[in-house]
Image (cartoon, rainbow, N blue to C red):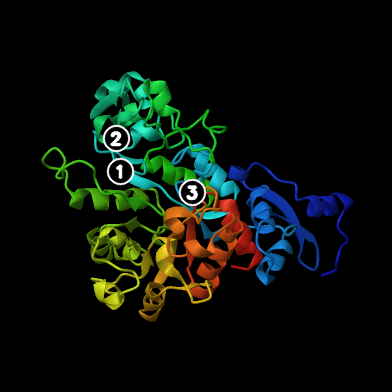
Amino acid sequence: MEKIRPSWMAMVALMLCVCLPAQAGGQYYYYDGYKYKKVKRDVIELGPRPVFLVNDMDESRLKRKLQSCAKKPNKKSDFSIGHRGAPLQFPEHTKESYEAAALMGAGILECDVTFTKDRELVCRHSQCDLHTTTNILATPLAAKCSEPFKPAEFDPMTGELIAPASAKCCTSDITLAEFKTLQGKMDAADSRGTTVEEYMDGTANWRTDLYSGRGTLLSHAESIKLFKKLRVKMTPELKSPSVEMPYEGDYMQQDYAPQMIDEYKKAGVSPRKVYAQSFNLEDVKYWIENEPKFGKKAVYLDGRYSDPNFDFRDPSTWSPNMYELEAMGVNIVAPPMWMLVDLDSDNNIVPSIYAEKARYAGLDIITWTLERSGLLASGGGWYYQSTTDAINNDGDTYDMLHVLARKVGVKGIFTDWPATVTYYANCMGL
């Protein structure tokens, strides 16, 4: 075949990458040796934060490597998992948060799954978090909340807080139709609030309300439809019910767990694109035994850190241990990232014994959650608790990520701001 010269328009398109909106994909040209062809690709926009974090790193070989990637093009990566979307700046589990995460290159998006009064599945981190994650208290539906809003009480003489403001509003308090009338907001509440307005206005100062003007809530089925449109994989987490089960006497966990999987089947989603998660090992075992195609990629979220007898540094306290988990058919384990790392005698971040034992047992590892800690100058808080003495600036985000990726060997990491992880994944060829 005779080679042809591309037109000047094709050349300009190649250099500039003429693109359509992210949800529709984009177009660019590539030269196959004979002619320039038009193909689709996802539009990726990472913004300034990754480079800001890189520039904040201490001088190192890793910093120079990451700096060298500042002008490289980026593509979507399954290593970058949108934790509830992009909740560092967008209301979690909303259409807008998910679209932002996809735009930042997240190859996998998460819908935490719980149920409504009419037993429909919806995306919420907790069954009873509507009072902090939506505007329900400012709507007539507040009358249906399990516990109405109570203002904070202060000592009239000293001004000391006697009782914090409180409320409890659950998805099981309302129907799906009612749920859909609500608007998502940044997950926060001011415990010192004396009015509903003050209580709802509690966003942390390192987050923002800039994108909270629109927060479209989604059913689980709607999230699947959106994720298919965004061309991403899916990781639903089956949340532990906050209400007594069986719900209303006849809705059991054995109904709830398969209902989530059934919605993927109904939508025609391949099990290869679904990473079902649960902190409840029984849920994971149920999928392994009853939905083996989905069970193969089921993720056991290891929350045993809440057990006072569990020590991530002492394998004798782990029940089941890694080999027992593998024998049950579990292929993927997902602890918080601090359980995967530790400090050596020189204060270097290194893989923990938990990480080493998981690898020896042949388990894949996913972890959570990067970019959920605010400013890191004071050690990083809960997610960095095993490495606090080595964390003193925001650039340490990438030092932690590098150890998790290269030394621990995680297959992906949940993040509240996917651009940070997408940048690293593309720079390192993950």
Q: Which residue corresponds to mark 1?
A: 114
**Disc number placed over residue 171 in the picture, else none:** 2
Is the Cβ of the residue at disc 3 closer than 8 Å to that at disc 1? no
Q: Earlier in the sequence, mark 3 or mark 2?
A: 2
Is the Cβ of the residue at disc 1 closer than 8 Å to that at disc 2? yes
Residue at (19%, 50%) from the top-left corner?
253
> Which residue type does callout 2 highlight?
Thr
Q: Which residue corresponds to mark 3?
A: 228
**Disc number placed over residue 6 in the picture, else none:** none
Q: From mark 3 to mark 1, how far is it between C-alphas?
A: 20 Å
Q: From mark 1 to mark 2, how far is it between C-alphas?
A: 8 Å
289 displayed left or right of 360:
left
Is disc 3 placed on a helix, strand or loop?
helix
The quarter of the picture where residue 54 lies is: bottom right
The quarter of the picture where residue 142 lies is: top left
Is disc 2 placed on a helix, strand or loop?
helix
Return the residue found at the far front. 157
- Graded by Cα atoms within 10 Å as few (under 14), some (14 to 19) or many (20 or more), the crowding at tag 1 reads many
- Graded by Cα atoms within 10 Å as few (under 14), some (14 to 19) or many (20 or more), the crowding at tag 3 reads some
Residue at (42%, 24%) from the top-left corner?
198
Residue at (79%, 54%) from the top-left corner?
14
**Near-viewer residue (209 or 390):** 390
Residue 320, x across and y down, in percent: 24, 71
Residue 74, x across and y down, in percent: 67, 57
- Graded by Cα atoms within 10 Å as few (under 14), some (14 to 19) or many (20 or more), the crowding at tag 2 reads many
> Which residue type does callout 1 highlight?
Thr
